Amino acid sequence: MSSKPNAIVAQSGGPTAVINSSACGVIQEAIKSGKIGRILGATNGILGVLKEDLFDISAEKPETIEALRQTPAAAIGSCRYKLKSLEDSKADYERILDVFKARNIHYFFYIGGNDSMDTADKVNKLAAQGGYELVCMGVPKTIDNDLAYTDHCPGYGSTAKYVATCAMEAGRDTEALYTTDTCTILEVMGRNAGWLAAATGLARRCAEDAPHLIYMPEAAFSFDKLVNDVREVLKEVGRVFIVVGEGLKDKNGRYITADTGAFGKDSFGHTQLGGVAEMLKSVIEREVGIKARFNKLGTNQRSAIHFASLTDSNEAYMCGQMAVKYAMDGVNGKMVTLVREKSAEYKCVTGLAELIDVANGEKKVPAEYINDEGNNITDAMRDYVRPLVQGEVPVDIGEDGLPAFMRFERRPVEKKLPKYL
Amino acid sequence: MSSKPNAIVAQSGGPTAVINSSACGVIQEAIKSGKIGRILGATNGILGVLKEDLFDISAEKPETIEALRQTPAAAIGSCRYKLKSLEDSKADYERILDVFKARNIHYFFYIGGNDSMDTADKVNKLAAQGGYELVCMGVPKTIDNDLAYTDHCPGYGSTAKYVATCAMEAGRDTEALYTTDTCTILEVMGRNAGWLAAATGLARRCAEDAPHLIYMPEAAFSFDKLVNDVREVLKEVGRVFIVVGEGLKDKNGRYITADTGAFGKDSFGHTQLGGVAEMLKSVIEREVGIKARFNKLGTNQRSAIHFASLTDSNEAYMCGQMAVKYAMDGVNGKMVTLVREKSAEYKCVTGLAELIDVANGEKKVPAEYINDEGNNITDAMRDYVRPLVQGEVPVDIGEDGLPAFMRFERRPVEKKLPKYL
């Protein structure tokens, strides 16, 4: 056994097509650094730390680690476990430090969104208070693209490419069948931010192309406006293809629909959304008198490695890799950010933001990316998203004609502490 | 102008990723034959013939025609217009022949499913009765794979590959988040036949892999059984990924759900289905007490050229090409079929079936492809579908990072007859 400090890498929140690419960057760079003993994976994010559910990633085959780049979702395991303030969740934070101490963990790399950055920040502060040497680095991840302090988020480009392609393809379906199936609604994710809905606008190269209407949570939605918009498009194009973000809100900022069932809120207290497209379908059929269909890609839009953006995948890897490099250089308590250079050709480098700032921030689609009518995007949005969807991630195909994914062997690390949770 | 006989090519019914590949085969082979004057496209299938909405496909650029192979949906235009019996729809059939006569049309290539084969057969018989020389050839098309007399249908392999991949990918998402989002339901198309749901079984390479449960219209469905099945899988795997065909039926053969809205039936009188996955979600949440999600790919599953089967695309092309070759050899009133040769390596050639037989037939998933419990597939089904999903259709990518599709210029053919419809 090495006496070098060990590291934990963990993933959190909704998976993406490239979150494993970030994990690959962390792991490969940590091994390369020569300064880290064992790299442990925390099964299901912070839950794995709390439960001492750890496995030795550094003992996995190099080809398994490399194959992370073409495997979607979160191979280490993710969670939605919410830690509250240091006061309210004190036992949890102390347990995390106990596990770190018992394992000689001095590096914590957490790949996730703002809730994860919040957790990492609090663990870091508690360690500092107690004089335990710990480096906590955040690696950004979210298809929603709503993290502040970064030009864009790893995970967004791949889903953007996929949903824009889906709009193109299903748009051609509507074009072919417009004499009966005149309206199609594509529902995409995005609770508070319309970045994914906005991205589908890239698919529209001419007036005929889908999508004809894009509704984002940032623009107040009304059914009267919808009905008028649909009638206008029908006059011009003879059919209508609509993209809606799941989190549409009315002028008072209230979700136009919310699942009120038993599982209507997730563990973070976020309202679980669904049924926006279905609601639009019924209104359009009733008020406009045309047949409407809806497609709801659901979790397929965040796991579609089979047509993921190579740019996104490479940047996700870079964020993971740089988190380790920065840590080795003595940086602590920061999240790696993506910085778009001001140049004619797209170029993206990394920067740093305070974990706590990212935790408390949110980035919505700015007004200048949305048209005046609030039903489409502007060229500025197209220019923003275009570089992010370039290239396709190469995926190995098995003998059965389907993609080949990796799974860890997961050699468990023996538990040392009393059971918790 | 040539005095050679002209041809009409038309597309009908629900689009697929490769129906344009069949059109490409018809057009390129018809040009190559040297025996056909102009090849006219009928905009929106038989509706285009009835309305004299025709355009000169032979005047389109060769690269436009070639690009049909990588463009999804129905580029000529499709329809759901239903012709009834020769007695009940006599005016329609006579109008079709009038249009054919006015344009010197002696070849009619109709790419579609059993309703289209029925139309082609009736037009053919009326022409024969009236002594008008006409060759009507059918080219099979349906993602549902439910046409009789053919081993499989062009369009099926591509959607099979896509939905199986979607099950793999979303399956990994559920695997990553199983501590909260424990159940995912993927709804796929298939009104009466479960071929697409069955195809997703190919994605399951080991017990951990999705899908764990597959429900097809061929196996009587009950909610009691579902709840038991889900509990069993949870015990074994700790999460559950379910694929459902949209047309699930109970033991009395009644759809477990049906859209009863204003557009509850399509123009063929088929019940429009939707909401099966949503219904399962609510039952599982209530009865099993776990959070469930659903993904409904909708028309995206039949238009996904970005990950379509090359085998399927090539066979779709071959069916179009062979329809012309057979026609040139004097064959009439037949649909081209796909015949799987009995050999160790997969090989597929074409055969012929009577249009009327295909029109009246239907092919469901046979009992030997479904397990005894009616909740999964057998190895025989895997062996059947595996060769059909091999290879990927190469798709050109534009500068914007998204696929490049073609559109016809559609130089309209001047109308000669009085308005109809």
Image (spheres, coloured by chain):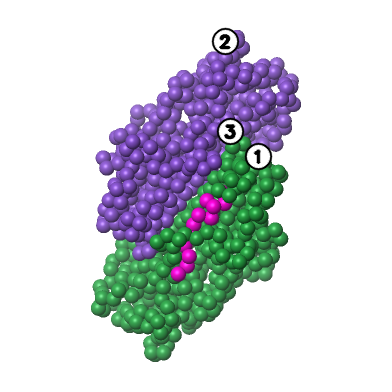
Chain colours: A green, B purple
Residue range in magenta is A269-281
Q: Is residue A188 magenta?
A: no
Q: Looking at the rendered structure, which numbered label has been put on residue B79?
A: 3
User: Alpha-carbon distance for marks 2 and 1?
Assistant: 38 Å
The residue closer to the viewer here, A129 or A232, is A232
> Going 45% across and 73% down the picture, which residue do you hit?
A116
> Going 53% across and 35% down the picture, which residue do you hit?
B266
Position of residue A165 measured from the top left corner of the image (x, y, whole percent): 57, 50
User: In the rendered image of this protein, does residue A37 appear above or below residue A396?
Assistant: below
Q: Looking at the picture, which amino acid does disc 3 mark?
A: Cys
- Kind of element beneath mark 2: helix
Q: Looking at the picture, which amino acid does disc 1 mark?
A: Arg
User: Is residue B331 found left or right of A216 in the rendered image?
Assistant: left
Position of residue B166 measured from the top left corner of the image (x, y, whole percent): 44, 50
Quadrant housing residue B108: top right
User: Is residue B242 found left or right of B84 in the rendered image?
Assistant: left
